[in-house]
Image (tube, rainbow, N blue to C red):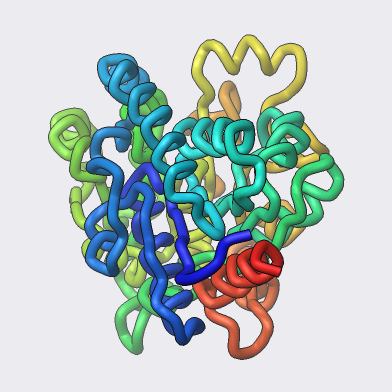
Amino acid sequence: MNEGPLTVCLVAGEESGDQLGSELMKALNAALSSDVRYCGVGGERMEALGLTSFFPMSDVSVMGLSAVLARLPLIIKRIYQTVDDVVAANPDVLVIIDSPDFTHNVAKRVRKKAPHIPIVGYVSPSVWAWRPGRARKISVYVDELLALLPFEPDAHKRLGGPPTHYVGHPLSENAMELRPSAGERSPLTAAGKVLVVLPGSRGSEVDRLLDVFGDTVELVKRDIPDLEVVLPAVAHLEDTIRNRVSNWAVSPDVVTGLEGKKKVFRRAHAALAASGTVSLELALSGVPMVVAYKVDWFFRRLKDLNRIFKFAGVDSFVLPNIILGSKSIPEYLDEEVRPEILAPQLVKLLSDSPEREQQVKELQRLDEVMRLPSGHSQSGAAADVVLSVIKTNRT
């Protein structure tokens, strides 16, 4: 049992984790009258709030197989360093934040070397969609799990995972930034329909989807001549995307940056998107969409044995569909991702059709489904669980 000032270790591995960690630190500070010592691994936001990072988070914040392989010796070294530093700090709680390839490897080893340190996981891996056996394995080294999606506590209970608490999603807390103010999204009856195209944030996704999305837009344009196409691009893929869409029959307006993307969402009448968190952003913005995805060759072979995205009883790969328990958003996988299939669905969503009306009505239910109890913020709900774990550990 620890005595004296509180020590909280937080371990993040990328920018989104640094954001979650910093908001959690603010909520903990607001709830506690005593000073807290923060240590672990974090970025600029967490360090600005007093976290002493064991090393620069950028050492482990890499994306893409080639980048990971190039830095693998350093990443392995940092995993073991983090474990040793956490054990030496002997915190009242260790909070691992997303980035499971890094943070969960740390947690497993901390549990073996210092089993008395309670561990909270912040952001559930997608055990409901892929490798459900992970849920039971996670329960060995995670004492409490903080979930961003409302269906995840039941999923972990069904799969034998750790006790899981729904604490809300940051997107739903900031949904108003995605929603149009008066006059920002023109009526469907006005000239100029805005279609936002989102081929993914990873190079592999863009490689598989960009060409077919371009051909789809060309077909939609034939039915809707006044179509305006906008493509938000992540910074590291901007040059690649601009080069490849230069050959499209319908040239899109490529925009970059978070604020640029939010502005497009507030104007958009419909979207064609790759599967991912962006579908939840669009849904919260009230933008009807068609979602498509193509898996890589390895998972395509696996799908022949057991259809991917249908593990653990999940029959959708679109987050809003799963959250709402409906199939109102059309979704297409692999061989179904063809312009002649996607385009007619988009044309319906860009007109005053029953399909558009039904989807818009379903998306309006998201706020209620994702709402936390009155007075709770997302970071506040997460802090409540962490403080409960600390209290239990100190008694």
In this rendering, the answer to whether 12 lies above or below 303 is below
| Residue 381, x across and y down, in percent | 59, 74
Q: Residue furthest right?
A: 158
Foreground residue among 160 and 33: 33
| Residue 144, x across and y down, in percent | 68, 55
In this rendering, the answer to whether 99 lies above or below 348 is above
Residue 35 in view (yes/no)? yes
At 33% from the left and 70% from the top, the residue drawn is 267
| In the image: residue 270, left or right of residue 311 | left
At 49% from the left and 46% from the top, the residue drawn is 98
Residue 260 falls in image quadrant: bottom left
In this rendering, the answer to whether 313 lies above or below 187 is above
At 69% from the left and 42% from the top, the residue drawn is 316
In this rendering, the count of numbered labels is 0
Residue 65 falls in image quadrant: top left
| Residue 207, x across and y down, in percent | 34, 24
| In the image: residue 191, left or right of residue 27 | left
| Residue 378, x across and y down, in percent | 53, 73
Residue 360 in view (yes/no)? no
